[in-house]
Amino acid sequence: MSSIESEMIEAFISGLKDGGCSKTVTISKVAEKFEVDLGRAKLLVHESLAWRKQKMEHDRFVDTIVEAIEDERKGRRS
């Protein structure tokens, strides 16, 4: 993810937290701030959110495996 995409997604998330605006209005504000058309802003925000969600799910999956291995090791020591 490029730095501009990161900045856009942070602006989007921040806008949702701060303003209480709808997603569409917030994306419009992001598009205006970064001087890109609305379609491009929507695409970047949605792709970035999907990437983050996928990464979080992957990280949770890895954490679950690590915890299971650690639990198994503890069980063998007992």
Image (cartoon, rainbow, N blue to C red):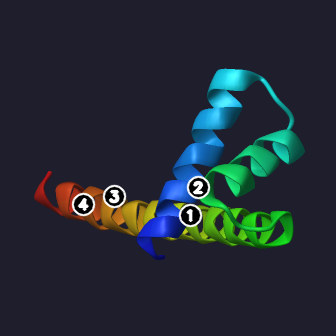
| Residue drawn where x is 60% and y is 71% of the image | 51
Q: Marks 2/4: CA distance?
A: 35 Å
Q: Is residue 69 above or below residue 25?
A: below
- Labels 2 & 1 near each other (Cβ < 8 A): yes
Q: Marks 1/3: CA distance?
A: 22 Å
Q: Residues within 10 Å of mark 3 (few under 14, many from 20)?
A: few
Question: Quick one: label 4 or label 1, which is nearer the N terminus?
Answer: 1
The image shows residue 3 at horizontal and vertical percentages of 42, 68
Question: Quick one: label 3 or label 2, which is nearer the N terminus?
Answer: 2
Residue 61 in view, yes or no: no
Residue at which label 4 appears = 70
Amino acid beneath label 4: Glu
Q: Residues within 10 Å of mark 2 (few under 14, many from 20)?
A: many
Residue 9, label in figure: 2
Along the viewing direction, whichever of 11 and 49 lies nearer the viewer = 11
Name the front one of labels 2 and 4: 2
